[in-house]
Image: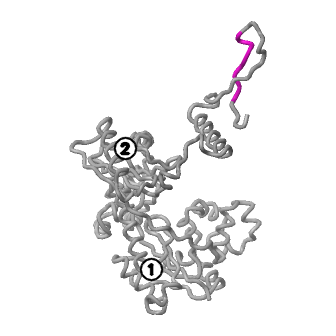
Amino acid sequence: MFVFVVCVLLPRFELAVAAGGHAALLREPAALAPLPGATQAVGEISAAAEAFGVRRGMPLGEALARCPRLALVPPDPAGVAEAWEDLLGRLEGMGALVAPGRPGLACFAADGLRRLHGGGLDGVLGAARRALGRPARLGAGPAAFCALAAAVRARVVRPEVVRGGGAEARAYLAPLTVRLLALRERTAGLPSPLERLGVRTLGELAALSRDAVADRFGADGVHAHRLARGRDDPLVPRRPPERLRESLELPEAGSGPALEHALGLLVDRLVARRERRGRTLRAVALSARLVEGGTWRERVTFREPLADPERMRLALALRLGLLPAPADALRLEVESFGPPVTDQRPLLDEAAAAREARLRLAVGQARALAGVDAALRVVEVEADSRVPERRALLAPFESGE
C-alpha cells in the first residue's frame, strides 16, 4: 500500500498577507513592491496583474509600462512568517507531521491520519480544510511532487487526488508542463532551458535517458528527471518550534544609536526569559516594522550557540545596517535553541582534537575577515645571527604546526 501525501497550496500567500487578505487582491492589479535599496523588480503578483503580462521578477519599469494601474504593496516578511507559522501550527494540531516548503506550500503524509479522521483520504482532506480555516488548494498523490501538481490543478472547493502508485503518478504528470518544476527550489532554474531545448512537458522529460539529462543539467537535472517519473524524496517533517519572542515599540523613528540601544534591550529581555531554561540560542530572527510601510526580517545563525548578551548584541548590530528604512518597532524571536550553557566547556578543558578544531575554525574566520595575512607564525631561521632581521621571519600559520 502506497503512502499518500497531501499537499496544501495557498497561492499568492505572501502578497495576500501584505495586502490584508485575498479580497483586497480582487479590487485592482497588485504586486509586491521591491524593498528600498534592493533590486528594482516586482515580487509576487495578483491574477489581475498576470493578465496584463506582468511576471514575478520583472523590472519595475516594465511592469508599470504593461499595467499602469498596478498597485505596489509594501512587502511584509515578518507578517508572512507569523501567519505561516500559525497555519503550520493548525495543521500540526490535527495530528499531521508537516514538511513545509516556501510560505504557502506544505506537505504531510496522510496514512497515519486515516483512522483519526474517518478512515479515508476524504476525511483527512476535510480535516485539513477545517484546520486551516481559510480557502486553500489541496492535492494528494503517491509522492510529494505528484501531490503538488495535483494541488496546482485543484480548486478551492474540489481537491485533486491521484490514486494508485508510481505508474499512475507518472501517467498523471506526463501531459503537464515542465514549469511545475519552478515550484521546487532545487529545480526552479530548469524550466526555461528545458523549453529552449524543446522539452515542454514532464512526459517528454521522463522519456529522456537519465545519463543525457545528467550530462546537460547535473544533479539538479537528475532530480527533475526523478520527479517527472513520479518519484520523489521522502518527506522530512519539521520539529515544531518553541515560540519565544520580545518586541519593542519605538517612540520615534528609530535609527543609528537609538536602534542599537533598543536591540540591546531586546537581547537582555530574551536572555532573561524563564522559558529559555538555561539553553543557548543557535538562531534568531530580527524583524522591524518600517515607518514607510511594510516590514523587514532577517534570520541570523550564530557561528556557535550563544548565551552571552554582549556577544549577541555584537552579532546582531551588524544586521541593523541592512534596514532599508527607519523603523518604529523592533522584534527579536528565537528560531532554534542550542545546548544548555553547562555543556559549553572552556577551551583548556577540551581534548586536544577538539581544541585543534576550534583553533582551526578561529584561524579561518580571522582570514575570512582580514585576509590570508591575518594569522602568521614566527619561524626561526638564523637564531645566532647578529642581524635581528635574520633571526626569524613570518610565515602563514597552519594548524597542527
**Vertical order, 377 against 364 (above or below):** above
Q: Residue furthest bottom?
A: 119
As rendered, which of 253 and 301 lies closer to the eye? 301
Picture quadrant where residue 104 is located? bottom left
> Is residue 326 shown above or below 241?
above
- Residue under label 1: 95
Q: Which residue is mark 2?
A: 324
Marks 2/1: CA–CA distance: 40 Å
**Place of residue 249 in the rendered image (x, y in percent of width and height, measured from the top left):** 25, 49
Point out the tag, 2 or 1, that comes first from the N-terminus.
1
Q: Amino acid at mark 1?
A: Gly
* Residue sitting farthest toward the front: 349
Residue at the image position 57 percent from the left and 77 percent from the top: 146
Of the two numbered discs 2 and 1 in the rendering, the one whose residue sits closer to the viewer: 1
Residue 145 magenta-drawn? Answer: no
Front-most of residues 7 and 173: 7
- Quadrant of the image containing the C terminus: top right
Residue count near mark 1 (Cα–Cα under 10 Å), binned few <14, some 14–19, many ≥20: some
Q: Residue at x 36, y 47 (%)?
A: 267
Colouring: one colour
Residue type pointed to by label 2? Pro
SS at mark 2 in the image:
loop
**Answer yes or no: do the residues labelled 2 and 1 have beta carbons within 8 Å?**
no
Q: Is residue 134 left or right of residue 367?
A: left
Highlighted magenta segment, given as a residue range: 388-396
Q: Residue furthest top?
A: 386
Check disc 2: other Cα within 10 Å, few if <14, some if 14-19, many if 20+: some
User: Helix, strand, or loop for circle 1?
Assistant: loop
Pinpoint residue 14: horizontal percent, then vertical percent. Answer: 39, 62
